Image (cartoon, rainbow, N blue to C red):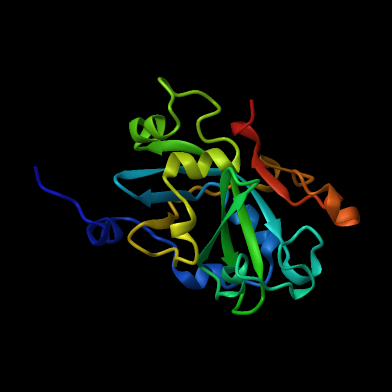
Amino acid sequence: MASCNHSEKKEKTKILPLSFYVKEDVVFLAQEFLGKYLFTDIDGLTGGMIIETESYAGATDKASHAYNFRRTKRNEAMYLNGGATYVYLCYGMHYMLNVVTNKIDIPHAILIRAIKPTHGVDLMLKRRTKDKIDKTLTVGPGTVTKALGINLSHNALKLNSSSIWIEDRGIKLKKNEILSSERVGVEYAKEDAKLPWRFRIKKEIS
């Protein structure tokens, strides 16, 4: 059986160029990611359609790790040019995948909260220690990373790398197909916790 390497996949699909991520409006981009496809090739190809995101507006956003331009070893990847990953460990248990956007030194990021699994489901089930697919397989940012095999070693990678990338497969959503609400678990952000910067595809919500 012939093998298919990542360069061959790139020629046949529309991987988002890094220029796509270098936009100023992180809230707009968080909605644009809905319907795009997130893939990893980590001991096997896995991926699916992005169905839930949250935007974090860097230095001006009290819910952001980079609020007031806070810069640490942990969040250094947020200051990269748009089109890189920012992966961190939450509560010492769950890895969280964020997509860095905007220009270098402007620490905007979008958290990937859920995907609809479409590729490599058997491998995702194995990673999640599940016997069959259900609605919880890749819903929640910690389950997304576990299913896709993402950990801290995948921090600060470009999103056109051989191990992680996002594709545009031609799905276009109308505004009335997107549900916005407050972000999850950011009560400490005071008034910014009420910003409706969590986005979901309505038809994918049970």
Quadrant of res 51 = top right
| Percent coordinates x, y for residue 44 in the rendering | 29, 44
Q: Give 1 or 128, whichever is nearer the viewer.
A: 128
Question: Which residue: 50% across, 73% down?
Answer: 19
Question: Which residue: 57% across, 44% down?
Answer: 94
**In screen coordinates, is 174 left or right of 138?**
right
* Residue 114 in view here: no
Q: Residue furthest left?
A: 1
| Percent coordinates x, y for residue 179 in the rendering | 71, 41
| Percent coordinates x, y for residue 186 in the rendering | 79, 49
Q: Where does the C terminus fall, quadrant-wise? A: top right
Q: Where does the N terminus fall, quadrant-wise? A: top left
Quadrant of res 164 = bottom left
**In screen coordinates, is 191 left or right of 172?**
right
| Percent coordinates x, y for residue 112 in the rendering | 58, 49
**178 relative to 204, above or below:** below
Question: Which residue: 42% across, 57% down?
Answer: 165
Q: Residue furthest right?
A: 191
Q: Residue furthest front?
A: 92
**In screen coordinates, is 6 left or right of 29?**
left
**In screen coordinates, is 90 left or right of 161?**
right
* Residue 159 in view here: yes
Q: Give 105 or 39, whichever is nearer the viewer.
A: 105
Q: Residue furthest top?
A: 131
Q: How many marks?
A: 0
Question: Which residue: 42% across, 45% down?
Answer: 149
